[in-house]
Structure formats: structure tokens, C-alpha cells
């Protein structure tokens, strides 16, 4: 059982990383959604650097009206400052790889203790992992829409990307869970 979980988790992590790499490096998916250029970037950068020195998440609201209310239709901006610069890219990639591996191992562990019915058929194993990914996308990405957050289209695209990555991860995990180790049907028929 432990061997199946480990191998399925590793297979899932490889697929998860490969998908993320292809979509983000090959097609620039995330950078097009999250890293749009700001007009007069150097001026805005200098202003932000002067006024935001501590890491954190910040909201920039429009000035209140004379009645003390936020004016309708005015934008709200959000600013994120992690405290690291471009020099940390290599370290952050290693952290992302470790998180992908841990997440894949956790999901493989959950799959390994699923009901015999789910474990007995490849499509069920894939759907099990895909549904976990869909839950992560719905509760992790869709709430990022809103005031100071992503536009609805961006939140939906990010959620769709994450759901697809976990569906593909489920395909690898489902195949590996059956290929390495005792197949659930064979184990059930021998008892």
C-alpha cells in the first residue's frame, strides 16, 4: 500500500509540475493573467517603494465622498509585497516543487483509502482525484474574485487551469495506483 501511495504521488507530482511548466512557461498563462504591465511603471514603482516598505497585502481605496461613503464605480486596487525580489526565483521554484510533491502524496494517500468501488475502476480513480482538484479550484481560486481581487474571468480561468491540472494528475495517479501494487479486483476475487 505504501509503495502504491508513494509511486502514485510521485507520478502525480511529475504530471502536476509538467502541466504547470507547460502552461506557464510555454504559454505564459499565469503571467498574462497576473502580471500585466502598469503604465509609467517606474513612477508607480518608486511611489510604492517609498510608501510600502513592509511585506503584506494592501488595499488602496478611493477617497470617501462627503457623506463618508465609497463612491460607486470607483476601482479598488490591491497590492501584494512578499518581501522578496527576483533573486529568490530559484528558491521559490524548489518550494513550489516540494508543495506539489506533498500535495500529490496527500491526494494519493486519500485515493488509496477510497472505497473499493472507486479503486476498482480507472475512470473512478481519475474522477476521485479530479473532484478533489475541482474542490480546491472552487474554494481556492473562485474566492479570489471581488473587491481588490481578480476580475471574474481571471478567477474562472485560474480555477479551470487548476481543475485541469488535477484531472491530468488524477489520470497519472489512477494509472499508477493500479499498475503498481495489487489491483483491487484481483485482491477482492482472491478472498
Image: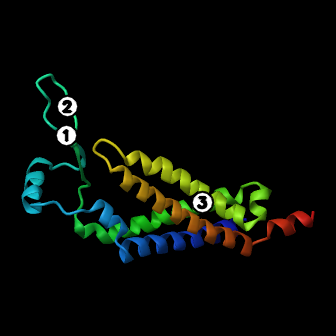
164 sits left or right of 183 in the view: left
Residue 102: image tag: none
In the image, residue 153 above or below residue 187:
above
The reply to whether callout 3 and callout 2 are in contact (CB within 8 Å) is: no
For the residue labelled by badge 1, is the local secondary structure a helix, a strand or a loop? Answer: loop
Q: Which residue is mark 2?
A: 70
Query: Sequence order check: which comes first, mark 1 or mark 3?
Result: 1
Residue 130: image tag: 3
Image x and y of residue 98, in percent: 46, 65
85 sits left or right of 142 in the view: left
Q: Which residue is mark 1?
A: 74
In the image, residue 148 above or below residue 178:
above
Nearer to me, 68 or 21: 68
* Residue for point 23% across, 56% down: 83
Nearer to me, 2 or 28: 28
Residue at the front extreme, as displayed: 73
* Residue for point 67% across, 59% down: 111
Nearer to me, 175 or 13: 175
The reply to whether callout 1 and callout 2 are in contact (CB within 8 Å) is: yes
Q: Quadrant of the N terminus?
A: bottom right
Amino acid at each position: 500500500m505504501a509503495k502504491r501511495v508513494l509511486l502514485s504521488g510521485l507520478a502525480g507530482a511529475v504530471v502536476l509540475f509538467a502541466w504547470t511548466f507547460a502552461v506557464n512557461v510555454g504559454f505564459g498563462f499565469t503571467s498574462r493573467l497576473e502580471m500585466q504591465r502598469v503604465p509609467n511603471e517606474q513612477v508607480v514603482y518608486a511611489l510604492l517603494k517609498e510608501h510600502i516598505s513592509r511585506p503584506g497585502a494592501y488595499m488602496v481605496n478611493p477617497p470617501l465622498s462627503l457623506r463618508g461613503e465609497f463612491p460607486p464605480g470607483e476601482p479598488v486596487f490591491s497590492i501584494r509585497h512578499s518581501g522578496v525580489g527576483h533573486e529568490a526565483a530559484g528558491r521559490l521554484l524548489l518550494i513550489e516543487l516540494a508543495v506539489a510533491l506533498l500535495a500529490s502524496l496527500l491526494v494519493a494517500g486519500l485515493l488509496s483509502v477510497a472505497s473499493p468501488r472507486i479503486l476498482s475502476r480507472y475512470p473512478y480513480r481519475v474522477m476521485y482525484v479530479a473532484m478533489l482538484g475541482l474542490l480546491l479550484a472552487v474554494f481556492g481560486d473562485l474566492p479570489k474574485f471581488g473587491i481588490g481581487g481578480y476580475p471574474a474571468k481571471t478567477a474562472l480561468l485560474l480555477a479551470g487551469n487548476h481543475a485541469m491540472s488535477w484531472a491530468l494528475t488524477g489520470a497519472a495517479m489512477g494509472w499508477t495506483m493500479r499498475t503498481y501494487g495489487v489491483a483491487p479486483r484481483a485482491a477482492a476475487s482472491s478472498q
